Image: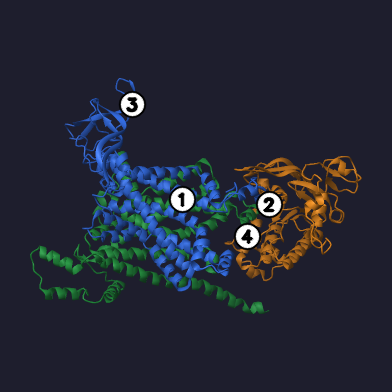
Chain colours: A orange, B green, C blue
Amino acid sequence: MTDNVLEIRDLGVEFKTDTGTTNALRGVNFDVPRGKVTAIVGESGSGKSVTANCIMRLIQRPGRITSGSILFNPTSTESFDIVALPDKDSLIYELRGGLISMVFQEPMTALSPVHKVGDQVSEAILCHRNVSKAEAWEEAAEMLNHVGIEDVSRRINMYPFEFSGGMRQRVVIATALVCHPEVLICDEPTTALDVTIQAEILTLIKRLQTELNNSILFITHDIGVVAQISDYVVVMYQGRVLEIGSTHQVLKDPKHPYTQGLLAAIPGIAPPDQRLSTISDVVGDIDITTAYPLTTLSDGRKVSLPQEALRKFSIRRTSETL
Amino acid sequence: MLRSILKPFQVVSARVRSMNYVTRRILGMFPTLFFISIIVFVIIDLPPGDIVTSRLDRMEAQGVEASPEYVRNLRARYDLDKPLYLQYLFWIGKFVTGDLGYSFFYSKPVNELVWERLGYTLLITVAALFFTWIVALPFGIYSAVKQYSIGDYFITVVALVGLATPNFLLALLVMYFSSEYFGVSIGGLFSVEYRDEVWSLDKVMDMLFRLWIPASVVGMGGTAVTMRLLRANLLDELNKPYVVTARAKGVKPLKLILKYPLRIAINPFISTVGLLLPTLISGEAIVSVVLNLPTTGRMLLDALLAQDMYLAGSFLMLLAILTVVGMLISDLILAWSDPRIRYE
Amino acid sequence: MSDVAQATIAPESPAQQALLTPSQLAWKRFKRHRLALISGLFLVILYLITGFAEFFAPYEKTTRNIKAIYAPPMSIDFFDTEGNFQFRPFTYGYTLTIDEVTWARKYIEDPKQKFDFYFFSRGESYEFWNLFKADFHFFVVKDEDGRLGYFHLLGTDQLGRDVLSRVLYGGRVSLSIGLIGIGLTLFLGVLLGGFAGYIGGFVDRVVQRIIEVIQSLPTLPLWMSLTAALPAHWSSIRVYFGVTLILSFFGWTALARQVRGRFLALRDEDFIVAARLIGGGNTRVIFKHMMPNFMSHTITTATLAVPGMILGETALSFLGIGLRPPIVSWGVLMKEAQNYQVIVMTPWILFPGLFVVLAVMAYNLLGDGLRDAADPHNIGGLK
């Protein structure tokens, strides 16, 4: 039995529009280890959120999953391939919010403006368990309290627009966790928040992860956040995975030139009094757009590079495709 | 500590704020009605000559010579010798106290003429409003959820044609088809056998059965507009992040649509009542002429043609009040349904 | 979600789009709406045909054909009764029979009266726009001896007048009321809305209140009251302008509201403040910097308001208190169809109604297309 809660293989997604077809994902491969925090980093349009939406089966027209599989290994039930589920399968609804749930980027818009907070949190319970409305509200209140909302008995009857951004994000997190999912996907949960609130929310997510012992897939473009929260890092670019490794490995000693470029572009790391280097400065003419297979290096990490570039690294097994 | 002390006050202040909205909105109605009354008064005063001259004309035609004193008395009786603003004040004063003046065309007090007809107008307008909603709601939702499907295109085309068809033409067509193909005459609000009967359950049923034809004819244009509006709003809402959140919670598709986007898209829908009312009342005025309904339209037209301005003015003013009050009600419902407005 | 949006942006390079001016971009967006394009074309043709109604209409609006009273529409044929094909289209005249029992008139195609079509030929003489006399028609029908025959594509009315000709002459009036009315509406709306939005404060409140009052009045009864007050002795042309004025006097509110909103929003935009700071006067700021930013929306709203005008005229004339004969408009023509017994006998006198529906529909579709084209944010393939 593998200890990966999610195993994503060769995942492909395309969007068909009037002006042409865009391949949002072009063969994505990575694992989400159980009980750990895995971060996906990458620039806008690299396919981070699309990947997350695939796991939740939230891809809608004009988007379409074209290939690949997402093997889900929950502890409670048998393993199954999420991609292979038929569109209206009841397992999809069980999955969403029950086994896997999601925290979104914009707490300002992620909550319905005309429903009470308690209604929105308890709805997740009512969707998945056969309990009375009152019980669901009670559990919702408990969870709201758990994510650090004070004076819950009053707040639960308020509307989201009466909450601050940080408070709303706590509500969103409570909604996501209220059914005790095995996997929590956080899609840039702190991007839209003030810096101080960001830190609070990150601490909260980290704390809840240790308490509830679930697996987290954390999507961000902020390397600082990655360093703070994650155990493993997946670097994505143009719908592909370029590098996978432990947070320490990837941030301390990135092997892929694109990752090196990403890190060099962080203001704090680069030496002062010097222009920040752009990614293309660092990458130079090394080809990062061609889809080379992921190769596992001797230290366990994986990179997607051409053979000649791999020569300087010690490779564990030749050209193992994940 | 401080928070728990403040708590009761906050609750009260929230209630006051929402009360405020209602009172503010009701008070705001009065200036509007005041301006409307001025417009209506101007219209009453608009035709060349006034009641006295038209009566004198009639007397003259009968060969009766009116003495200057008689004319003066007559003018004084109708306050026509006073300056215009005083005339207005007298008129509005009487109007508010329920004295709507005298109809020269029917030789009756206006009061005896308007109320029943106004009641039927209200009935048909409300029925048309219900028709609009009952049709627009499901088709609008379908059209949005199944965007670009054959059904959507079909609904769109029907809506386009419905929007472009003047409702008097529609009324004519309905009349033509019902008599040509079904052999029933649909003019009027009652079947022949009930027309002069006193009210009974049968008569009410008969009326309700016949009501939906004028209601649907009057409501057609509004239905098309509302449907398109609902579709656009829903499409807007369907892509909003909070809908994705709800989907990610595991909410099933049908419930998702009914609970979330519709709940929000319904707000502009409610507010369309305010926009619809003037259109519906306008539509009713002309449809009733074609379908020969016992409502305000026909009588207003006759009054205007006969320059029976007190009658016409009363109708105009009452229809305007009906609209303004209707808009008020729709605003209040909107405030009740959308907490954001309440707490504004 | 943002990633999804980003990933689906059109592959077209931004540089290529930047080369197009805003109006070129708008045209590009507009062209995507095939229905709007067709509608625009249809309206242009309709305005041309009704504008040159003297030439396109086979008859004058008052010409009576006493041989065909309440005659049904006639057909255009290529095959005669023996099945012979003839390249030049022709039509058969009518013989009138009267039912001996019901006394109903019945028109039967008469193969002995064969009228051939001649295009761009001389026919009935007319005075073009009251300017000069001419007798040149788009088409005329003649019998074998070259004498003028008769042809009524949409039938005739109770006086034997050609419905098609009357529809074309009526369209000139109804459609132009829409255009002139919208011109006035635009003027009033931009002026009052602009004042309210630009000056703000007291002026704004007054204009807002007026708009509110007018919008809460049921328009048709109001129009009825006002047009009924137009003096009966007025000449046709004065009644025409009177009705137009009344229609636009209560139609400007939506436009004014929109212009006001745009003015308010633009007033605080950085580029307007900048224009003012470098010394731009009111006139310059308004006309040079603000107008281009809301004119497209305003024109769209105006286009969508034309149908209201056309429908208003039709409704009023239909009730007999708008335009009155001798003016011929679509509404006046519809008035003749008020009696439904007449419709049952001669449904073709409803044809003017069909034209109203088509014109209004075309305006609505055109307006929809313009609205999308005017929206500068609407670039990509999505939506």
Q: Decide which of B49, B159 is in the foreground and name it.
A: B49
- Characterize the local packing of mark 1: few (<14), some (14-19) or many (20 or more) Cα atoms within 10 angstroms: many
Give the quadrant of residue C12. top right
Q: In this view, does B331 lie to the left or right of A211?
A: left
- Percent across and percent down for residue C28 are 54, 46
What residue is disc 3 on? Answer: C88
Q: What residue type is labelled 1?
A: Gly
Q: Decide which of C269, B13 is in the foreground and name it.
A: C269
Chain letter of the residue carrying label 3: C
- Percent across and percent down for residue A231 are 83, 56
Q: What residue type is labelled 3?
A: Arg
Let me know if marks 2 and 4 both belong to one chain: no
Chain letter of the residue carrying label 4: A
Q: How many labels does the image show?
A: 4
Q: Decide which of C190, A244 is in the foreground and name it.
A: C190
Is label 3 in contact with label 1 (beta carbons under 8 Å)? no
Let me know if marks 3 and 2 both belong to one chain: yes
Q: What element carries label 2?
A: helix
What residue is disc 1 on? Answer: C367
What residue is disc 4 on? Answer: A109
Q: In this view, does C244 lie to the left or right of C146?
A: right
Chain letter of the residue carrying label 1: C
Q: Is residue A247 left or right of residue B46?
A: right
Let me know if marks 3 and 1 both belong to one chain: yes
Viewer can see residue C199: yes
